[in-house]
Image (cartoon, helix red, strand yellow):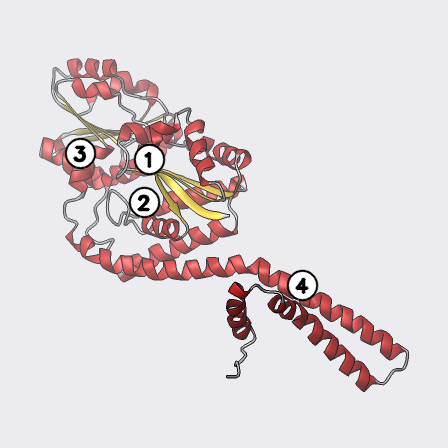
């Protein structure tokens, strides 16, 4: 079995491709069971965020796992191949460490990915697809991420998608304190965004969610109003800034709904940031006048600002990662030797028991203990040396020298000149 990782991310695939291979939280365990059940895969975990979909697995047929990703999402393999990266063994380990440390994120050093990785581990544990190898890989990834954050400045000068959305809103409106803000969704990303906007003291905050209970929980912390998604058609026009990030597989804000809101606002501009993958806002909305619509990828230029301190820490972080990759690969190599070492010890145990049984019978017959011990030791020696001696005697000329060197090394012999 090989450690294999593959997927697509914001560097390799545009948003319209990424949103086709998203795994929703409520389907994750089913997907893992399907992946392991249909393929020669021993372990598997799936990381699915707005910026990446990655599969980590232990398999001896990596191509089957890639075909499964396309099949599961009802796509053709050739549709995904141009965007997919494939990583084996050491490269997969290094990639996992870089992802956990925030070095592979759209926002360099962002900490949110750690929570997403932990969710991936939890889903794999619940599905029963997280074995020793992937458990060790992710636990070491979390350790590396902590070391990188405590030993470098990779997390300094806080920059995030949430902060970028707030800064972009300020560029368009100037003073957010005069604007009404609507958050659609109540998950982690909306929670982060609401903190950045609330700190700027907007005129009004509203939280819309599929279930009113979650909307109320967030709105209480923000001193905001709570509504359901069913209220959006009437409420949309009352807000100047809309931040949306839900897990809906279909758009929540269609072109018609937004167009009606613009007319009701008498063409006062409306600013929308859609952080969801798949998107919450129909792409046709961008065609409307007086609408400033930004998707996840549109924020990339903004989040790159003010990153000098983090960039300076990259080399140090990469050094920490490389050191840990070496340690992890050493552990993997040791793990691969375990079956051979166990088999060798089992064979030695069989030899020992056989000679011990024979010696015990001899002692029971009253034979001289000294001679019994001598016979036991000679029998063990002969059994242990028979196979290497026989192999050496029957070896071909072209492999004999190599066998001699190997036996000298294994038994720490000093060849006489």
- Relative to residue 58, is residue 33 depicted above or below? above
Q: Which of 321 and 183 is in front in this view?
A: 321
70 horizontally vs 267: left or right: right
101 or 214: nearer the viewer? 101
Mark 3 → mark 1, Cα distance in angstroms:
16 Å
SS at circle 3 = loop
Which residue is denoted by mark 1 in the rendering? 218
Which numbered mark, 1 or 4, is in the foreground of this view? Answer: 4
Cα gap from disc 2 to disc 3, whole angstroms: 25 Å
Residue appearing at x 52%, y 36% in the figure: 39
Q: Residue 57, image x and y in percent?
A: 46, 44
Which residue is disc 4 drawn over? 346
Whether residue 147 sits left or right of residue 385 in the image: it is left
Residue 64: x and y in percent read 47, 36
Q: Is residue 57 above or below residue 387?
A: above
Q: Which of marks 3 and 1 is nearer the N terminus?
A: 3
| Whole-number angstrom distance, CA of label 4 to CA of label 3 | 72 Å
Mark 1 crowd level (few <14, some 14–19, many ≥20, 10 Å Cα): many
Secondary structure under the numbered disc 2 in the rendered image: helix
Residue 153 appears anywhere in the view: no
* Residue named by callout 2: 112
The 10 Å Cα crowd at callout 4, few under 14, some 14 to 19, many 20 or more, is: few
- Tally the marks: 4
Q: Label 1's element?
A: helix
Q: Of callouts 2 and 4, which one flags the residue occurring earlier in the amino acid sequence?
A: 2
């Amino acid at each position: 079995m090989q450690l294999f990782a593959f997927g697509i991310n914001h560097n390799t695939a545009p948003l319209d491709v990424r949103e086709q291979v998203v795994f929703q939280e409520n389907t994750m365990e089913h997907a893992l069971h399907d992946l392991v059940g249909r393929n020669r895969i021993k372990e598997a975990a799936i990381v699915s965020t707005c910026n990446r979909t990655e599969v980590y697995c232990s398999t001896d047929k990596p191509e089957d796992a890639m075909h499964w990703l396309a099949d599961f999402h009802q796509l053709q393999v050739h549709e995904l191949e141009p965007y997919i990266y494939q990583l084996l063994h050491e490269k997969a380990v290094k990639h996992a460490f870089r992802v956990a440390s925030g070095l592979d994120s759209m926002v360099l050093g962002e900490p949110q990915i750690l929570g997403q990785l932990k969710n991936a581990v939890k889903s794999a544990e619940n599905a029963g697809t997280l074995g020793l190898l992937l458990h060790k890989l992710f636990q070491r990834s979390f350790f590396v991420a902590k070391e990188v954050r405590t030993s470098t400045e990779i997390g300094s000068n806080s920059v995030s998608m949430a902060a970028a959305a707030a800064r972009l809103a300020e560029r368009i409106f100037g003073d957010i304190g005069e604007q009404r803000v609507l958050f659609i969704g109540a998950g982690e990303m909306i929670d982060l965004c609401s903190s950045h906007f609330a700190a700027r003291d907007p005129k009004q905050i509203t939280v819309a969610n599929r279930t009113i209970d979650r909307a109320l929980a967030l709105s209480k912390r923000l001193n905001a109003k709570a509504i359901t998604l069913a209220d959006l058609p009437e409420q949309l026009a009352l807000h100047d800034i809309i931040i949306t990030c839900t897990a809906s597989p279909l758009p929540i804000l269609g072109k018609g709904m937004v167009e009606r809101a613009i007319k009701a606002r008498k063409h006062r501009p409306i600013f929308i940031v859609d952080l969801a993958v798949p998107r919450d806002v129909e792409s046709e909305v961008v065609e409307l006048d007086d609408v400033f619509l930004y998707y996840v990828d549109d924020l990339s230029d903004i989040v790159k600002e003010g990153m000098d301190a983090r960039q300076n820490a990259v080399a140090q972080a990469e050094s920490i990662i490389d050191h840990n990759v070496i340690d992890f690969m050493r552990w993997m190599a040791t793990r691969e030797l375990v079956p051979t070492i166990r088999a060798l010890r089992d064979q030695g145990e069989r030899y020992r028991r056989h000679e011990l049984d024979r010696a015990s019978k001899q002692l029971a017959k009253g034979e001289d203990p000294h001679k019994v011990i001598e016979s036991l030791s000679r029998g063990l020696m002969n059994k242990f040396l028979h196979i290497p001696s026989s192999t050496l005697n029957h070896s071909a000329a072209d492999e004999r020298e190599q066998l001699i060197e190997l036996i000298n090394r294994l038994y720490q012999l000093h060849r006489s000149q």
